[in-house]
Image: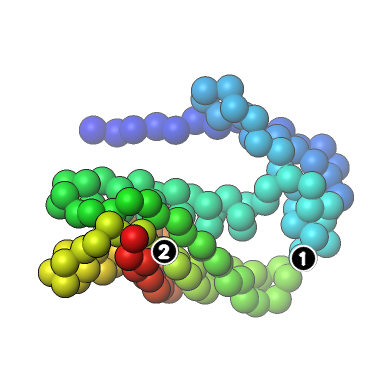
Amino acid sequence: MAHEYPVTLTWSGGRDGKGEIVLENGIKVPISIGKSLGGLGEGSNPEELLTTAVGACYVMTFGLVASNRKLPVESLSVQVSGTLEGALTDLKFTKILIRPKIRANSPTPEQRETIMQTAHKAEQLCIISRTLRGNVEIIVEPEIEEV
């Protein structure tokens, strides 16, 4: 079964230009080239959108797996950082670091271990991570906070 995710994009200008992404549901996201690459930095950029896609996929996958395993997870926050390397005309992502902070409600030692396993499993199951695997190193550094 195939799933399609159409978006529409517009752009005006060059390096100092601006554009917009319009999602199928009508949500609009402004885009521009990031300041670190000489652009305006007045909207999101492809680099942020890729790391955002990795993070969004990760949190949703983690939530599904943790729920299915009935783990005492109260909440999850994730910081995702992508590393670009190369000359300006040959930049590419070399690494994406996922740092989940998992708040768990008094987990037993066994549940704590399962939460840590789930933190790594979520990256392995995530559609976006699987798509990038082999091209970009993806590292998961989970932290559990007991509440």
Query: Where the N terminus falls, by quadrant?
Result: top left
Residue 145: x and y in percent read: 37, 66
The residue that disc 1 covers is 36
Local packing at callout 2 (Cα closer than 10 Å; few below 14, some 14-19, many 20+) is: some
Q: Secondary structure at mark 2?
A: strand
Percent position of residue 2, x then y: 29, 33
Q: Residue at x 73, y 45 (%)?
A: 43
Residue 88 in percent (x, y) is at 73, 70
On residue 101, the disc is 2
Question: Which disc is residue 108 wearing?
Answer: none
Residue lying farthest to the bottom in this orientation = 86
Amino acid at pointer 1: Ser
Q: Where residue 105 appears, x then y in whole percent? A: 27, 57
Q: Residue at x 52, y 73 (%)?
A: 94
Pick whichever of labels 1 and 2 is earlier in the sequence: 1
Q: What residue is drawn where x is 79% and y is 53%?
A: 41
Q: Count how many numbered circles sit on residues in the image.
A: 2
The quadrant of the picture occupied by the C terminus is bottom left
